Image: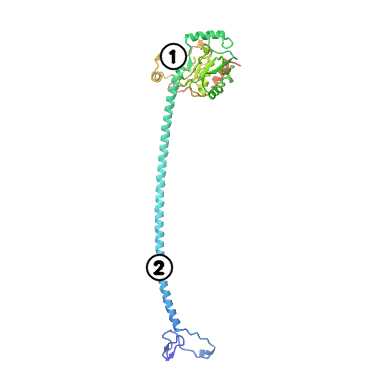
């Protein structure tokens, strides 16, 4: 027997290879000659056993780790796939929701357009009703006519006040260059100022002066009775009205109404009664509507207020009919053959030229 120089185990004397550590036991002769100069490393048997044990444990850890890691990796991949599926589903739902939202917005836009149309129609109908109501008030009282007693008083006043009234049997115009005194019988300072600013627009073209006084004598006297419409006596007819009574009423305040009524003050008639007018009245419609509420007129009243023209021999040479004149009352297109009257709120070019002709500077 001999001892293995590597693992220190006993082996057969003729053994070439150690059966324990598998080391070769044959030593070359040339190697023997240099044994004294060689460094031989001897492995401890216990160390070798420990190394084998440690290698086995490491192998077990590697196998288990690989298994566990592979399991966790597979689980992670499964979670990724699941998340991708959920994300795809969410995107599909979002896309579907967006389509539903777009459809809902389209429906909302259509509903809004329908509602706006209905509201527009309603406002138009309300406007037409309001227009007809205003029309009824205007037709009744926009240009007041004198009673026989007032006519006599007016004639006397014209004869006595030659500096104010023209001595002309045709028309009821003021003297060119005269001053017309105007007094407010009620109303507040703000409303008075608004009337002053609007009314003086006529003075840019007519050679007359409006003098607004707070007390004393006045030719024109204004109230703001909201239940009495908007009206005025025509020109110098105001001289026949007792001085404690109004000659104009402004039951509603807007630029058009003030300009219209002060046109009457200067002697301009309702434009639809212009002797030269040629309006295509829808007579059947007008008769039907004005014979019912709120007017309830008989045929004679309708003829006098709407269809009758002023007598040319009672007026100064009158202008051609002007559908844009501020002196038009409000008539819907359905009444006048397709041309609505009384929609403007400024003096027309014809208004300016005609008043300048009647009151030249």
Residue 207 horizontal side relative to residue 78, left or right: right
Q: Residue 68 — which label?
A: 2
Look at the image and tell me in which quarter the C terminus lies: top right
Q: Residue at x 40, y 68 (%)?
A: 68
Q: Residue 61 — which label?
A: none
> Counting residues from the N terminus, which is met first, the one under dot 2 or under dot 1?
2
The nearer-to-camera label among 2 and 1 is 2
Q: Residue at x 54, y 9 (%)?
A: 157
Q: Is residue 124 visible?
A: yes
Residue 168 rendering spot, x and y as whole percentages = 55, 9
Residue 6 rendering spot, x and y as whole percentages = 46, 86
Q: Is residue 32 above or below residue 355?
A: below
Given the current orientation, which residue lies at the most extreme right position? Answer: 361
- Secondary structure beneath label 2: helix
- Secondary structure beneath label 1: helix
Mark 2 burial class by Cα count in 10 Å: few <14, some 14-19, many 20+: few
Mark 1 burial class by Cα count in 10 Å: few <14, some 14-19, many 20+: few
Q: Is residue 324 visible?
A: no
Residue 274 rendering spot, x and y as whole percentages = 49, 16
Residue assigned mark 1: 304
Q: Residue 80 or 126: which is nearer the viewer?
A: 126
Q: Residue at x 40, y 54 (%)?
A: 88
């Amino acid at each position: 027997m001999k001892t293995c120089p590597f693992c220190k185990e006993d082996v057969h004397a003729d053994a070439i290879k150690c059966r324990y550590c598998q080391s070769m036991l044959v030593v070359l002769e040339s190697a023997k000659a240099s044994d004294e100069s060689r460094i031989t490393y001897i492995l401890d048997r216990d160390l070798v056993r420990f190394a084998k044990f440690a290698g086995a444990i490491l192998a077990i850890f590697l196998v288990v780790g690989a298994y566990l890691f592979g399991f966790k990796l597979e689980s992670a991949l499964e979670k990724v796939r699941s998340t991708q599926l959920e994300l795809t589903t969410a995107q599909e739902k979002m896309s579907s929701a967006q389509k539903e939202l777009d459809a809902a917005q389209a429906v909302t836009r259509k509903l809004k357009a329908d509602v706006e149309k209905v509201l527009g129609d309603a406002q138009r109908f309300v406007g037409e009703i309001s227009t007809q109501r205003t029309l009824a008030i205007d037709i009744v009282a926009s240009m007041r006519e004198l009673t026989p007693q007032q006519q006599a008083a007016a004639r006397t006043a014209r004869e006595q006040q030659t500096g104010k009234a023209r001595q002309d049997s045709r028309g009821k115009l003021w003297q060119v260059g005269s001053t017309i005194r105007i007094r407010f019988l009620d109303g507040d300072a703000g409303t008075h100022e608004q009337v002053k600013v609007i009314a003086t627009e006529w003075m840019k073209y007519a050679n007359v002066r409006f003098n607004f006084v707070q007390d004393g004598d006045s030719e024109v006297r204004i109230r703001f009775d909201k239940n009495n419409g908007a009206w005025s006596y025509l020109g110098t007819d105001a001289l026949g009205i007792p001085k404690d009574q109004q000659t104009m009423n402004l039951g509603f305040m807007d630029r058009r109404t003030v300009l219209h009524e002060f046109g009457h003050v200067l002697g301009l008639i309702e434009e639809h009664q212009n002797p030269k007018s040629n309006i295509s009245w829808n007579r059947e419609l007008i008769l039907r509507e004005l014979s019912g509420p709120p007017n309830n007129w008989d045929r004679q009243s309708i003829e006098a207020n709407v269809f009758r023209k002023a007598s040319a021999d009672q007026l100064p040479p009158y202008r051609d009919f002007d559908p844009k004149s501020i002196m038009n009352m409000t008539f819907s297109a359905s009444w006048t053959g397709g041309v609505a009257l009384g929609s403007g709120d400024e003096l027309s070019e014809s208004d300016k030229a005609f008043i300048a002709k009647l009151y030249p500077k």
